[in-house]
Image (tube, rainbow, N blue to C red):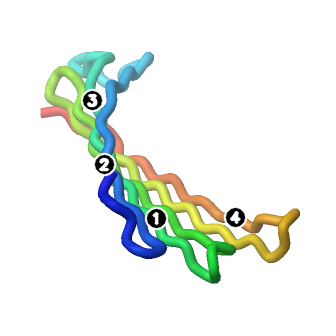
Amino acid sequence: MLPPSGSQVVAMQAGALWVSQPEFAELLEGGAELRVLTGYAFANGSGFLNVESSSRFLGGGCVGGRLDISAGYRPSPNWLAMGQVFSTTPHRCR
């Protein structure tokens, strides 16, 4: 993780990926995912925006990706309004 800058944070992560039912015959089940995350707090910490983007590399030369966006605002201590969008690009094989 990079050092926080005020109300913003940026991080990178890498991990193993397992696809239990591959879409294509040439797509192997194992691979890796590289992810960049950034978050921003606003309204004295009552609101936030989080954006995550990843690239997936699977055995057999296949690649894909994801984009996740979350935003929220806490109008009172017991309530949180939140919206999320998850987008996945299909695996493409060479």
Can you tell which mark lies on residue 32? 3
- For this orientation, the residue located farthest to the right is 78
If the image is split into quadrants, where does the C terminus sit? top left
Q: Residue drawn at (37%, 71%), measured in percent from left and top?
A: 5
Locate residue 4: give its quadrant: bottom left
Q: What amino acid does circle 4 point to?
A: Met
Q: Secondary structure at mark 3?
A: strand
User: Label 1 to label 2, Cα distance in Å?
Assistant: 12 Å
Image spot of residue 13 (x, y percent)? 32, 42
**Would you say 55 lies left or right of 9 here?**
left
Comes first in the chain, label 4 or label 3 = 3
| Residue 11: x %, y % from top left | 34, 53
The residue beneath circle 1 is 39
Q: Amino acid at mark 1?
A: Gly
Q: Residues within 10 Å of mark 4 (few under 14, many from 20)?
A: few
Q: Is residue 54 above or below residue 28?
A: below
Mark 4 = which residue? 82
Report helix, strand or loop for mark 2: strand
**What is the count of numbered marks?**
4
User: Residue at label 2?
Assistant: 12
Mark 2 is on which residue type? Met
